[in-house]
Amino acid sequence: MEKQHTRYSRLAHITKLINSKSELRPLLEHVITAISEEIMQCDSVGIYLPQEDGKFRGYVGKPEVINGMTLDMHVVDTDYDLLAKEVIETQKTIYIPDTAKDNRPDPRAVGGFGIKSLLALPISYEGELFGLVFLFDYGIPMNLTESEIQTVEAYVHMAGVAIRNAQNLTRKENLLTEKQLLLDLTRDLSMSSSIPAVIDKCFYYVGTVLKNDNIGVHLLDPLAGAKIKPANLSGKSDWTEEEWLERHDELRFDPSEDPVFHEVIRTKKPLLIRDVSKDERPNQDVCRSFGIEGMLMLPFVTMGKVLGALILVDFEKGGPGFQEADIQLAQSIADATASTLSNLLYMEKQEVLIEERTSEIRVKNKELEQVVAELENLSREKELVLNSVGEGIFGLDLEGKITFCNPAGESMLGYEKGELIGQSYNLIFDKDSHAKQKSLPMEEDLKFRKKDQTRFSVEYVCSAIKENGKKIGEVVTFRDITERKQLEEEVRYLAYYDSLTDLPNRILLDDILKQEITRAKAADQKLAVLYLDLDRFKIINDSLGHSYGDLLLKAVAERIRLSVTEETIVSRQGGDEFTIILPNFRSRYDILNLVDQLTASFAEPFYLNGNEVYMKTSIGISLFPEDGDTAEVLIKNADAAMYKSKEKSGTYHHFFRSEMNDRNLENIILENALYKALEKEELVIYYQPQIDSRTKEMIGAEALLRWNHPTEGMISPIHFIPIAEETGLIVPIGKWVLANACKQLKQWHMRGYSNMTVSVNLSGRQFEEDDLISMVKSILVETDIAPEFLHIELTENQIFKNTEVTLEKMRELKRLGVKIALDDFGTGYSSLGYLKNFPIDTLKIDRSFMLDIVKDKDNAAITDTIITLSRNLGLNVIAEGVETEEQLAFLRAKQCSIMQGYYFSKPIEAGELAKKYLNHL
């Protein structure tokens, strides 16, 4: 009895260490100690963990030194150790009481250490192998009992849980690190104003992720027939950029003709070549010259267009040993860089065009000056030359009267021949702008008036006319520069406004926000920044096409504009993100009113060339001065708050700092309690009946999870399900719900209600689990339930969050015979396409359409359409949220026979459900 108590104490202690997330090695050392204290006759016990080469090396054990060899010098090779191979393949414990009678153990180890008996166990958890445990003796055989072996297995199971937890913690830390890295990259790119600066940031982040700084960038040159040219080399590379470029010239290497570049640009996907000598695609002369052994190439892609490629090379034998996750993160860095590069390349191109036009104008100005100089000496006999000049020319006397004007000038000003002679210069010039008030000669650009009083931009030269050294008048030469001014305005507009939505862009927003902050400080006022991100925009953009995506962005921008006042500033940050500045708000009610207006505007569908699309937006809010006193900090904090809203996957808003921190504290408290809720049996399942409206009999029930907290009372799943999904607790909780719902269904069947079905909701997180299908199958077998009586429910958002994985799992469930229902139909991105392609049996009309269904024509039409659509596609349909006699009558008239809602019953416990319905069947 005392030994059993000691054993429980050891297990409890190890469990406590696992829950406290202790370091892995000391935790496994506790497991080794517990085993060695439990099996006294054991001479040695050790834990062996896998290596990359498939062998297993000693990690912890007792004793630490055997025959002069430390444990980490011990290697288990399955080519020699058939016992280890069998344990790995079967994942079962194998006990050999006498090694002399069994040839499976490695004979080298048996002979070298004099092993007499041996116990080998797999370290695994939920089917995944993490390592091996070996117990053996050198003298008297251990003679282990079944009870002792089971005890060792219990300790080894704890080791598996510990390793699994350590791996999960490492994965979570890696995800947080990657997210922060991408946020830092986005911030650094937004502050980079030149192409070299952007590429340097890319070099830094890619080098940090892949731990290799031998990186170069090649860009497509649109002015050279889209040829690929070497552009920049990392300053930390083994080569200098000058040597790199010279070697390209010496080798006459043209990347535009290289198969590796061709493949990356064509596929728009990264390409990894670990050993260039074994691959026919790389240019072997170039690889030998630079000493390249392996390479990774990443495309710069933005809006479907390839700008160039980043190439990282390895000079060591064996090539780069990058993991797939590292390559994907590096590609994300390249994608973010490409977006910034695209904007800078466009601006650079516009600057070149402006410079070319400016040079042309300078040349023309010199020509005009020469013409003016010649005009000072013109006589009446040279009038023919004057009339042939394309620029406008007119003369003024000392009183400012027009003395002559050539045909080109009369045409540009809209006057008939000779009509200007004798008129005052004020007819053409704006008042007080006449050049004779200034030093001569001079050049200037301003606006001239036409005869019809319209104005146009001109560039003019005004010079004195002298006779014998005395000024007798002036000559003005001018040209129409309206087109040039328009081009300059367009370039200025493109620099500060989004060309798609005509909203201020990120650059202009930064200037405006800085001005608003200065104004708010001076007037002691408040300021709010709202950061909006469209939910599921990428899905719509990819499904309908980029042209529809552009139409949707323009429509969204217009909806936002109509939802705000004139004092409110709206801008587009880029992609599907928008920013709103609300100056001088009085209280948070002003902000919430604005959020309500935005939410209401998104409630109506968007119509895109005949396609009806519903959109939702996640909103993050930061306040001045509470959440920051600079434009950068306020936008960053609003963006962070938006990401908290994004986790809700719907139209939600989050305030930064205190409100968010309060919720975080509540979530942490709730999360801690949720970890113990399943163990303490605080979770309960309620059932809501599904009624055949024709017979008023219950044909099935939906299982709905509730949490009966010991101090807080009944907690709604709205509050704890998101936490369960975020922490991964939804996986064991979901399994528990499914198992208990099937057990309850089996009890109803045994009472004679053999046609009853049960519907269970599965989360998107559960669909990510590799063992989902085997888990469902196992529960059906254990509860002896035929698959067709189990209905699995999932939402549209779950389908589109990870379409390929979800679709494959749905098909496997269908092959089992399980029925699949689509919950909340009509509230997401509903499409006939996926209804045809996805293995769906039932559509559930969302409860929101039941509201005022008798009076609201839109809700009535949508509900009627869903019922008709289901019937035509051969699908069942269930109406949720039925609460009134009028709703019941409407649905019956539309031939919707299965209903669910408070009209029939609220969700109740299984016992109460049986009393209310099953006893009357």
Image: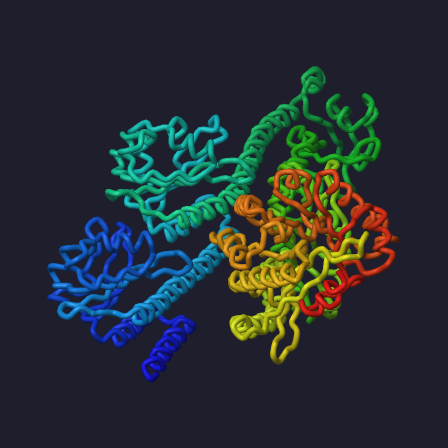
Q: Does residue 226 appear left or right of residue 764 in this picture?
A: left
Q: Is residue 711 above or below residue 180?
A: below
Identity of the residue drawn at 60% across and 60% down: 746
Identity of the residue drawn at 66% across and 41% down: 835
x then y, percent, for residue 658: 61, 72
Q: Is residue 156 above or below residue 56?
A: below
Q: Quadrant of the N terminus?
A: bottom left
Q: Quadrant of the C terminus?
A: bottom right
Residue closer to the observer: 393 or 871: 871
Identity of the residue drawn at 50% across and 55% down: 778
x then y, percent, for residue 15: 40, 73
Q: Is residue 681 above or below residue 297?
A: below
x then y, percent, for residue 147: 32, 71
Question: Across the whole image, how many numbered discs are drawn on residues?
Answer: 0
Examine the image and state in which quarter residue 541 appears: top right
x then y, percent, for residue 264: 43, 34
Residue closer to the observer: 192 or 166: 166
Examine the image and state in which quarter residue 582 appears: bottom right
Residue 121 can be seen, yes or no: yes
Residue 507 can be seen, yes or no: no
Structure colour scheme: rainbow
Residue closer to the observer: 861 or 339: 861
From this viewpoint, which residue is outermost toward the bottom? Answer: 2
Q: Does residue 338 appear left or right of residue 381 in this picture?
A: left
Identity of the residue drawn at 38% across and 56% down: 128
Residue closer to the observer: 658 or 850: 850
